[in-house]
Each structure stands twice: as structure tokens, then as C-alpha cells.
Image (tube, rainbow, N blue to C red):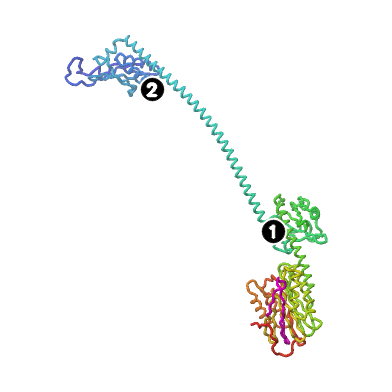
């Protein structure tokens, strides 16, 4: 350590300074002395602290101030080496203050009571060296003890801090572990939620697919069940399957003789050429075993993936075999189920169509067998038309009859049994036969209808019928009775058309009734028209409107009875939906049967049509 001069260049006081006991001429100005200045390097910090302690002790600084100043110097020098240390005094009239600075920074100031009474600080610094050294040693020991105490305090604080840090580290580690576990649980929950969502989505897609399949099968049932023609059912079946569920489709139907015939091949022949009539082996196997079978790829042709053959079974009867191929892939399990369900609905529709066609054929044969030949000969010219409905069984209870009794009386009859089908046709046949039998012996048509009324109530009380019966004698006298039937029309030779009105209740109603007849005389060239309600009824009009239209068409229809019948049917049925059977009977009287003379007819209930 290099020590600078301890006395500042200005000395211990400026000129005019006073001594103790003197009366000053003026207020005393502050004085300043630089006592020591050191250039301190790294190894001189302790000596500088000792010198400062010695100086402060000699100058009478308090022990607490000395310890504070030395400690502050020591702490400052530890971080600022090398540097300069300056210790100076300032003095005014009452106080002497020591100032300790490191560089330009003042780090400690203190009052120096011991030096305040001395006019010579240098003398104070030079006196009492042994005692001062002892005191300095005590100060340094105090500083060291204070430093040890501070170090011990800092060490304990550091230990507490270390323990706190260790505890914090442990807590952070525990929290990190908890966060890791929480993150793992969140990942598991997320995976579970994603799996649940995927499952829900899969379930939703499965439900949508199931709804789509049910809707398709419902549509299939409605479309196939709407037809009673087996050829149309097969055609619709192929259209429904191709190309959504099949690339090609065909149906092999069994006939009454045990054979199989191909129908409705869509998309080309599957297993047999177009001209081949023999069924393939897979069709025969399905027909025998009554089980669905698949033909793997390669056994048919390289272009076909597989062939699916499904039996068409209805009420235990195998009607045929449905054979399909997939559009562009092998059949999945759901595809097989859908095709099988479609085959079940197709089998039910085919069974209904085949049963209907069989019943219709039987009914048509029965009805045609019951339609009689019209009478021919002098005095009468007749023509009849029977047009079955275009829907349903195409047969019903409409009928006509015309014949001559041995006495020459012409019998004309038209009737209509309520309902359609075999039951109506069978009852119609019974009534027609009974009417003919009664009319052969009973001379009056009212009595014939009375007997028919009792007969139908006896044999089939759940049905009823309408009928009209006329008996024309050889001299042109006509007796006519009606049972709930539309009124017949009479066209006079001059072209006037009249409606013959005489109403009675329908046959078979649960009432007792005796029918009566009215009579009138027919003139030469008179023409009669009997008909059923299928010719005049329309859904959007009352029946009287239809009768008026028929009368107008009948009035202007030219030609023979055949031409009149055709002309009336053409006019009346051109806008008809033909939902009911239509029957009409046209009869013209010639001079051999018509009444003599051109006078007015006998009084009747016939009313002219306007």
C-alpha cells in the first residue's frame, strides 16, 4: 500500500484560525484536513482497514461508528480493487467530523469527540500509539466478530434458503409428477372421449345405414305389392336391385309342371346364354335345398366376382330363384341380408299376383260360360256388350240374358251383383239361372223378381243385387219390373228417347217385398237399351247426369243394334276409368213382333227424356 501525505496542502487550518480560549473577532469558518490517502490494491485492503481503524480510534470516534466505518470500507474494497481511499476531517465551531471515501463515493461519516478539543489533529494522531493499537485490535476483533456473526447469520440464512430451495424443488418435482399424471389422465380421458365419439359416430352411421335399409325395403314392398301382374313384379324387382345392389339380376320361376323359366333378366344373362332355357345347376340346388347359395369368383367367368342365388319362398312354397351379381365387388354380409329381404318381399308379391291371375282366369271362364247366346229370328234383333273392369279381378256380378219362351215371349234381363271376384260371379250365375228358370213358368216379371228376392236372402244374405226383367209378347206388349236397377231407355221410331221409371228395392235387402210390373206397347222400330251402372257412374257427377248423357248418345246412334251398342260404348267410356264392370243389352223390335198401328202406347210409368 502506498500512503500519500497525511496533511493536506492547505495544512490543518486556514490563516486566522483561533485557539481555545480566544474570543473570535468573527464567526469561525469550517476547516478541512485530508489526513490520509491510500492507493489500495488487492493485497492492501486489510492494512487500509487497520489504518482507518487506528485513525478513528486516535481521533476519539465512537466504537459503533468505528465498527460501522471499518465494515463499510471492507465491504466496499472487496468489490472495487484497486482504488483510492481517503480519510479527511471537517471542522466547524462546535463539531469535528471524519469523512471516509472510496474513490469519489463517501461511504461513512462520524463525529470525532476526542479530536474536537485539540487544535492539532496531527498531534492527536501521533499520541497514544500503544493504547491506540490495543483499541484498534479490539475494534478489528469486533469487526471480525461482527463479520463472523454476519457470516454465521448468512450461512444460516443460506442453509435455510437451501432447505427452502430443496423443499421447493421437491414440491416442484411433486407438482411436476402430479402434472405428468394429470396430463396422462387427460390423455387417457381424451382418448376415451375420442373413442366414445368415434363409437357414437359409428353408431350414428350404423343407425343411418339401418334406416336407409329399412326405407329401401319399405319402398320395395310398396312398389312390388302395387302390381298384380307377375311379369310386372319381376320387372320391378330387377329395376329396384340394379344397379344399386346388383350388376345383373334375373328370376327363374317354377311352373305347374316342375319346370323353371327365366324372367326379367336385367344387365345380361348371368349363368346361361340368352337362348338357353335349361336352368343352371346353382338354381336347381337352391330350389331343392331352399337355401341361399353363393358361387365364388372364377367358377363362372373371370369378369364376375360372385353370384348370389336366393330362393323365393312364400307360405312354405318355393316360387322360384332370384339370381344376382354384385356391381363391382363381392357381396358383403349386409348385401346378402338386403337381397334376401328383397327376395322375401318379392316372393309375397309374386304369390299374390299368381293367385290373383289364377282367380281371374277362373272367374273369366265362369263368367263367359254363363253369358248366353242372344236370340235370333223374326221379330227381334239383339246385341250385347260385356266389358270387365280394368282393375281388380276384371270380373264381377254384371250379367245379361235374352231368350224366347216356347210361346214366343221374348225375355230380356240385366242384373248386377254387388262386389267383384269369384263370390260375386258365382252368385250372379245362380241368380241368372234361377231367373231363367222362373221366367220359363211365371208369366209376370214382378213375380219372378219376388222369387229372386227370397232366393238371394236364403242362399247369401250378405249380398244384394239389382235387376231388371222385361217380357215382350209376340204382339208387342211389354211387361217390365225393376229391382233397384238404373232405368232402361226406350227409343221410339221417331227418335224420341224415354226413360222407363219404375223403381223397386234391391234384391236381397233384409225386408219383405213383392215386386209388381208395368206394361206398355212397343211400336215397329222401337229400340230398348238395358245397362248396368258401370256405363253411367262417374265419381265427380251424380247418376242422373250419366243417364242424360247416355240418352243423348242413344238418341243419335245410327245403324244396326251392333252399331248402336258400339257407338254408345265409345261415347260413354271414352272418359271413364273403367273401375267397374259394364254391361248393356240393345234390342230392336221388327214388324213381326211390334204392336199394330202408330197410336200412343198404353199408359205406363215411362217418362220421356229431354
Q: Quadrant of residue 320?
A: bottom right
Q: Position of residue 98 (x, y in %)?
A: 29, 19
Q: Position of residue 202 (x, y in %)?
A: 63, 47
Q: Position of residue 26 (x, y in %)?
A: 17, 21
Query: Measuring 70% from the left and 50% from the top, which residue is drawn there?
Result: 334
Residue extending furthest toward the right: 257
**Gap between marks 1 and 2, in whole Å?**
104 Å
Q: Is residue 126 above or below residue 110?
A: above
Question: Magenta residues: mostly which secondary structure?
Answer: loop
Label 2 residue SS: loop
Image depth: mark 1 or mark 2 in front: 1
- Range of magenta residues: 501-528
Q: Is residue 392 above or below residue 153?
A: below
Q: Which mark is residue 590?
A: none
Per the image, the residue denoted by label 2 is: 80
Residue 502 forms part of the magenta stretch: yes
Query: Neighbour class for label 1 at 10 Å: few (<14), some, many (≥20)?
Result: some
Q: Is residue 268 above or below residue 76?
A: below
Q: Is residue 566 above or below residue 350?
A: below
Q: Nearer the viewer, residue 402 or 72?
A: 402
Is any part of residue 94 visible from this angle?
yes
Q: First in sequence: mark 1 or mark 2?
A: 2
Query: Neighbour class for label 2 at 10 Å: few (<14), some, many (≥20)?
Result: some
Left or right, 32 with respect to 398, comes to: left
Q: Position of residue 602 (x, y in %)?
A: 70, 86
Quarter the N terminus occupies? top left
Query: Measuring 48% from the left and 24% from the top, which residue is drawn there?
Result: 163
Left or right, 320 with respect to 8, comes to: right
Residue 512 forms part of the magenta stretch: yes
Q: Quadrant of residue 461?
A: bottom right
Q: Nearer the viewer, residue 320 or 532?
A: 532
Per the image, the residue denoted by label 1 is: 221
Amino acid at each position: 500500500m502506498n500512503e500519500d501525505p497525511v496533511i493536506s496542502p492547505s495544512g490543518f487550518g486556514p490563516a486566522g484560525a483561533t485557539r481555545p480560549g480566544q474570543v473570535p473577532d468573527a464567526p469561525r469558518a469550517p476547516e478541512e484536513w485530508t489526513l490520509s490517502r491510500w492507493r489500495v490494491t488487492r493485497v492492501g485492503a486489510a492494512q487500509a482497514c487497520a489504518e482507518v481503524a487506528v485513525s478513528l480510534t486516535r481521533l476519539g470516534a465512537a466504537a459503533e461508528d468505528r465498527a460501522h466505518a471499518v465494515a463499510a470500507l471492507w465491504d466496499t474494497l472487496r468489490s472495487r480493487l484497486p482504488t483510492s481511499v481517503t480519510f479527511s476531517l471537517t471542522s466547524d465551531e462546535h463539531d469535528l467530523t471524519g469523512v471516509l471515501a472510496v474513490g469519489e463515493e463517501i461511504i461513512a461519516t462520524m463525529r470525532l469527540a476526542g479530536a474536537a478539543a485539540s487544535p492539532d489533529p496531527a498531534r492527536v494522531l501521533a499520541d497514544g500509539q500503544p493504547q491506540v493499537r490495543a483499541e484498534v485490535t479490539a475494534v478489528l476483533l469486533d469487526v471480525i466478530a461482527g463479520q463472523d456473526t454476519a457470516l454465521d447469520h448468512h450461512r444460516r440464512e443460506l442453509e435455510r434458503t437451501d432447505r427452502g430451495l430443496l423443499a421447493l424443488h421437491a414440491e416442484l418435482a411433486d407438482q411436476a409428477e402430479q402434472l405428468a399424471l394429470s396430463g396422462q389422465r387427460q390423455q387417457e380421458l381424451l382418448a376415451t372421449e375420442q373413442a366414445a365419439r368415434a363409437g357414437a359416430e359409428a353408431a350414428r352411421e350404423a343407425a343411418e345405414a339401418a334406416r336407409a335399409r329399412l326405407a329401401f325395403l319399405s319402398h320395395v314392398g310398396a312398389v312390388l305389392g302395387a302390381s298384380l301382374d307377375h311379369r310386372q313384379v319381376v320387372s320391378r324387382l330387377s329395376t329396384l336391385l340394379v344397379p344399386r345392389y346388383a350388376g345383373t339380376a334375373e328370376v327363374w320361376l317354377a311352373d305347374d309342371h316342375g319346370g323353371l323359366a327365366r324372367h326379367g333378366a336385367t344387365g345380361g344373362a348371368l349363368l346361361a346364354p340368352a337362348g338357353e332355357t335349361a336352368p343352371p345347376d346353382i338354381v336347381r340346388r337352391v330350389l331343392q335345398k331352399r337355401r341361399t347359395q353363393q358361387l365364388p369368383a372364377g367358377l363362372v367367368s373371370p369378369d364376375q366376382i360372385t353370384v348370389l342365388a336366393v330362393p323365393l319362398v312364400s307360405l312354405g312354397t318355393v316360387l322360384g330363384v332370384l339370381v344376382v351379381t354384385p356391381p363391382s365387388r363381392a357381396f358383403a354380409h349386409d348385401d346378402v341380408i338386403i337381397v334376401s329381404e328383397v327376395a322375401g318381399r318379392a316372393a309375397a308379391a309374386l304369390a299374390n299376383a299368381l293367385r290373383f291371375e289364377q282367380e281371374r282366369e277362373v272367374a273369366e271362364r265362369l263368367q263367359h260360360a254363363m253369358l248366353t247366346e242372344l236370340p235370333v229370328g223374326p221379330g227381334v234383333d239383339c246385341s250385347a256388350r260385356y266389358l270387365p273392369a280394368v282393375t281388380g279381378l276384371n270380373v264381377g256380378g254384371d250379367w245379361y240374358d235374352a231368350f224366347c219362351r216356347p210361346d214366343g215371349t221374348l225375355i230380356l234381363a240385366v242384373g248386377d251383383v254387388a262386389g267383384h271376384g269369384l263370390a260375386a260371379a258365382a252368385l250372379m250365375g245362380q241368380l241368372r239361372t234361377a231367373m231363367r228358370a222362373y221366367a220359363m213358368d211365371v208369366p209376370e216379371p214382378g213375380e219372378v223378381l219376388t222369387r229372386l228376392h227370397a232366393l238371394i236372402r236364403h242362399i247369401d244374405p250378405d249380398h244384394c243385387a239389382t235387376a231388371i226383367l222385361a217380357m215382350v209378347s209376340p204382339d208387342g206388349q211389354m211387361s217390365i219390373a225393376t229391382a233397384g236397377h238404373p232405368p232402361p231407355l226406350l227409343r221410339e221410331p221417331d227418335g224420341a228417347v224415354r226413360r222407363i221409371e219404375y223403381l223397386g228395392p234391391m234384391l236381397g235387402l233384409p225386408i219383405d217385398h213383392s215386386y209388381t210390373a208395368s206394361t206398355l206397347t212397343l211400336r215397329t222400330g222401337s229400340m230398348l237399351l238395358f245397362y248396368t251402372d258401370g256405363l253411367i257412374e262417374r265419381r265427380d257427377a251424380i247418376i242422373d247426369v250419366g243417364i242424360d248423357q247416355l240418352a243423348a248418345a242413344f238418341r243419335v246412334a245410327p245403324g244396326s243394334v251392333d252399331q248402336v251398342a258400339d257407338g254408345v260404348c265409345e261415347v260413354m267410356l271414352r272418359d271413364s276409368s273403367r273401375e267397374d264392370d259394364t254391361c248393356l243389352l240393345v234390342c230392336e223390335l221388327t214388324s213381326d213382333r211390334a204392336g199394330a198401328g202408330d197410336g200412343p202406347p198404353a199408359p205406363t210409368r215411362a217418362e220421356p227424356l229431354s
